[in-house]
Image: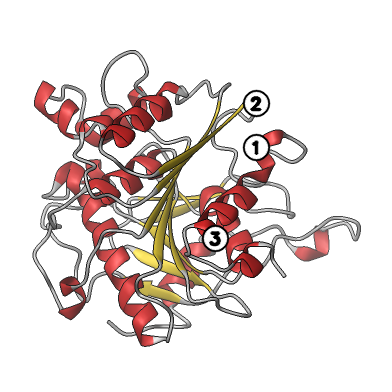
Amino acid sequence: MLLNRRSALGLAALAATPAPALAMTPVSRQVAPPDPTETIRLWPGAAPGGANVTVTPQVVERSTDPAFHDRFAQYTTDPILTVLRPERPNGASLLLIPGGGYRWAVVDKEGLDCARPFAAAGVTCFVLRYRLPADGWAAGPAAPLQDAQRALRLVRRQAAAEGLDPARVAVLGASAGGHLAGALTASRDAVYEAVDAADGLSFRPDLSILMYPVATMQGPFVHAGSRDNLLGANPSPEDLARWSLERMDWNGAAPTFLLHAMDDASVPVENSLQLLTAIRAAGVKAEAHLFEEGGHGFGVRLIAGKPASVWPELVLAWAARKGWISRVASSGS
């Protein structure tokens, strides 16, 4: 797997819908930061189990404001990592898994936007664009988990190759991406056949950060859209239990940080509360922050002036206490 700093695939996908022309942008308005140009393909050939996949990848821009992008990737067939490199790397690496209800994966709000404060603190960041379960992949609901396991292994291999610490690789997942990050954190067995030497490395993260995660697949607090997109319209009771994070075996899992807004009307806060109870019962070291307001899907851009806006600093302080980064790096100095 070669590192491709100017991947035509990544650039073409990120720019699938042109940004508003700068000539039309008022001088007083901000302009969205440029996209990173470095990408890494997850799989050396075709992604596994794609014989019946006929979808055409697309990236859709929803923002009409030149100050920010708001894109989502749908029908992904060639998953990638987009790399954000800090000016002064501190040795830590972070895999970011955005949400999208397993219908699509957002690119900016819970991906590139969330990566930037961590890169500013010295963390080398990798934003995952993953395959979706309803697109015909042979692995079905396990297809995104295949990508997440492979991505974590590639990040760990990349860290070792670049003089970073392969024992300081964390994952951050938001919403349905929080479900995928949680499944990655709890999983013990690989869900795909090894394809190269990177697959001899551990796919289990050293720290896990779950933002307003979709956790349960059953009961009154389920996010029905994520459940249906992951498991189909009529999942069996066994699949509902198997894919509920609070029902998974968390013994030996990495220290986990949970954050959620109490007024989340899409993914009720009980998803985090139930998961917190389960992981504590398994002996997992955990920290949780519940905010009075913030709603769902806030990332870093949609909570300016609200209590939840401090979440990156809270994560960095927690990570410093866990030895993932230095306290100097966590302050941004």
The image shows residue 320, relative to residue 70, as above or below, that is below
Q: On the image, numbered disc 3 is attached to which residue?
A: 320
Task: Point out residue 155 in the picture as x, y percentages from the top left corner.
Answer: 35, 71
Q: How far apart are marks 3 and 2 (CA)?
A: 26 Å
Q: Distance between the residues labelled 1 and 2?
A: 7 Å
- Image label count: 3
Alpha-carbon neighbours of circle 2 within 10 Å: few (<14), some, or many (≥20)? Answer: some
Q: Is mark 2 on a helix, strand or loop?
A: loop
Q: Do the residues labelled 1 and 2 touch (CB within 8 Å)?
A: yes
Alpha-carbon neighbours of circle 1 within 10 Å: few (<14), some, or many (≥20)? Answer: many
Q: Which mark is residue 276?
A: none
Task: Point out residue 202 in the picture as x, y percentages from the top left corner.
Answer: 22, 66
Q: Is mark 3 on a helix, strand or loop?
A: helix
Q: Which mark is residue 293?
A: 2
Residue drawn at the location 65% of the way across and 69% of the way down: 328
Alpha-carbon neighbours of circle 3 within 10 Å: few (<14), some, or many (≥20)? Answer: some
Q: Which of the two labelled residues, at mark 1 and mark 2, occupies the earlier sequence position? A: 2
